[in-house]
């Protein structure tokens, strides 16, 4: 059995890691297109983009690892079935249960690793991603700008740009709300950024525009000043290294502490409680998908692979749609947060366990 256990684990290892790589690549495609534009069109350093990509990967493991376990089971046992190795194993008097146990143990180990990932790695990577993005915005403000949207990262100014080409801006609108009067407006046909020596901000050079000013001595009266060149200093709010943590960036211990603090202050701690239980419950999705993978893998024949993969995709979508649905149920107050986040695991785990028990008895 030691040789057989090693053989089974080796058979599953390759499709498991290939599936993780493939799924991660698929999930990164949309981001890679945007990142490539930052490098090519806006001059962002490729090393900064590599950091952003690396920081994105841990958060994807919550989805890719369970799915990879399920697909690896189907592929590995499907290969064993095609080559009639499963028949040979059963003919040797080895019960299917003895094939399932090593896989279930591996699933438990992976669930334990996912607990560590969700507790430590994902929050750290999420915070590092935001800080890196902020640092890029400080060095290359044009990379932070998106045409057709209001940008509020340079208080007290609100920027709106119709077209961005590299470091060049076209049809620029800048609004500066005044505490004791109407909003000051700057309109320019063109603009471009120039770095400051201390890299704590940038100069924005504007060309061919106007400034709408109000007269403090005559409230309600405006005057318009035209300019050929106008320079503004923009500074991003806060130091990227000093950015505070959001709820998704807290460890289990920090989430528990924050929940206790909010409850003590009479503040609704439901979002914090949901995040804590979601992270813990999602870690154990691995063992659930391992159980379903064993059911599909031990039952399926080589001519049923397409049907099996349709079931695999449907199961994956159903599980995560139920997680989203239970999150909404908890927010409505219809179920406690801990129960809502564990309902998908309890239902799918119970159903998978029954099917697995029937499968190994065949």
Image (spheres, rainbow, N blue to C red):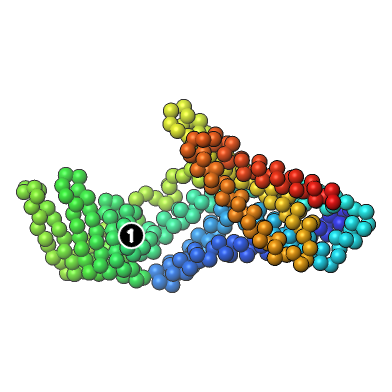
- At horizontal 41% and vertical 55% (from top left) the residue drawn is 134
Mark 1, other Cα within 10 Å: few <14 / some 14–19 / many ≥20: few
Give the quadrant of residue 144: bottom left
The foreground one among 323 and 227 is 323
Residue 252 in the image, given as x and y percentages of width and height: 57, 39
Which residue does the numbered mark 1 point to in the structure image? 149
**Residue 85 in sight:** yes
Identify the residue at horizontal 24%, vertical 61% (top origin). Answer: 173
At 50% across and 60% down in the image, what residue appears?
52
Name the side, left or right, on which 136 lies relative to 84: left
Question: Is residue 120 visible in the rendered structure shown here?
Answer: no
> Residue 63: x and y, percent?
60, 54
- Which image quarter: residue 203? bottom left
* Label total for image: 1
| Rendered location of residue 89, percent (x, y) | 89, 58
User: Seen from this angle, which residue lies furthest right?
Assistant: 92
Residue 239: percent from the left, percent from the top? 39, 50
**Residue 64 placement, left or right of 76:** left
Q: Image point 63% across, 56% down: which residue? A: 314
Q: Secondary structure at mark 1?
A: loop
Furthest residue toward left: 218
Q: Is residue 210 left or right of residue 191?
A: left
């Amino acid at each position: 059995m030691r040789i057989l256990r090693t053989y089974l684990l080796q058979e599953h290892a390759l499709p498991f890691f290939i599936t993780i790589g493939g799924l991660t690549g698929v999930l990164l495609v949309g981001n890679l297109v945007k990142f490539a534009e930052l490098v090519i069109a806006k001059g962002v350093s490729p090393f900064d983009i590599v950091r952003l990509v690396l920081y994105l990967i841990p958060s994807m493991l919550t989805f890719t690892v369970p799915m990879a376990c399920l697909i690896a089971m189907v592929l590995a046992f499907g290969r064993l079935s095609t080559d009639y190795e499963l028949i040979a194993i059963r003919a040797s008097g080895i019960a299917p249960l003895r094939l399932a146990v090593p896989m279930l143990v591996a699933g438990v180990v992976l669930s334990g690793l996912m607990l560590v990932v969700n507790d430590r790695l994902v929050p750290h990577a999420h915070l590092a991603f935001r800080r890196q993005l902020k640092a890029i915005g400080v060095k290359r403000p044009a990379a932070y700008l998106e045409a057709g949207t209001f940008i509020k990262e340079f208080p007290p100014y609100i920027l709106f740009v119709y077209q961005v080409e590299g470091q060049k801006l076209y049809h620029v609108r800048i609004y500066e709300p005044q505490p004791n009067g109407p909003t000051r407006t700057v309109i320019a046909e063109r603009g471009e950024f120039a770095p400051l020596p201390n890299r704590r901000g940038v100069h924005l050079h504007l060309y061919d525009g106007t400034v709408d000013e109000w007269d403090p001595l005559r409230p309600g009266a405006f005057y318009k000043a035209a300019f050929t060149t106008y320079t503004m200093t923009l500074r991003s709010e806060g130091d990227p290294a000093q950015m505070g943590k959001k709820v998704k960036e807290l460890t289990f211990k920090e989430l528990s502490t924050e929940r206790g603090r909010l409850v003590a202050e009479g503040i609704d701690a439901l979002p914090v409680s949901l995040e804590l239980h979601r992270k813990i419950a999602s870690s154990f999705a691995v063992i659930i998908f391992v159980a379903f993978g064993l059911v599909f893998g031990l039952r399926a024949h080589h001519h049923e692979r397409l049907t099996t993969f349709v079931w695999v995709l449907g199961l994956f979508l159903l599980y995560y749609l139920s997680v989203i649905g239970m999150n909404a149920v908890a927010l409505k107050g219809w179920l406690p947060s801990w129960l809502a986040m564990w309902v998908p695991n309890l239902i799918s785990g119970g159903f998978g366990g029954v099917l697995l028990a029937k499968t190994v008895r065949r």
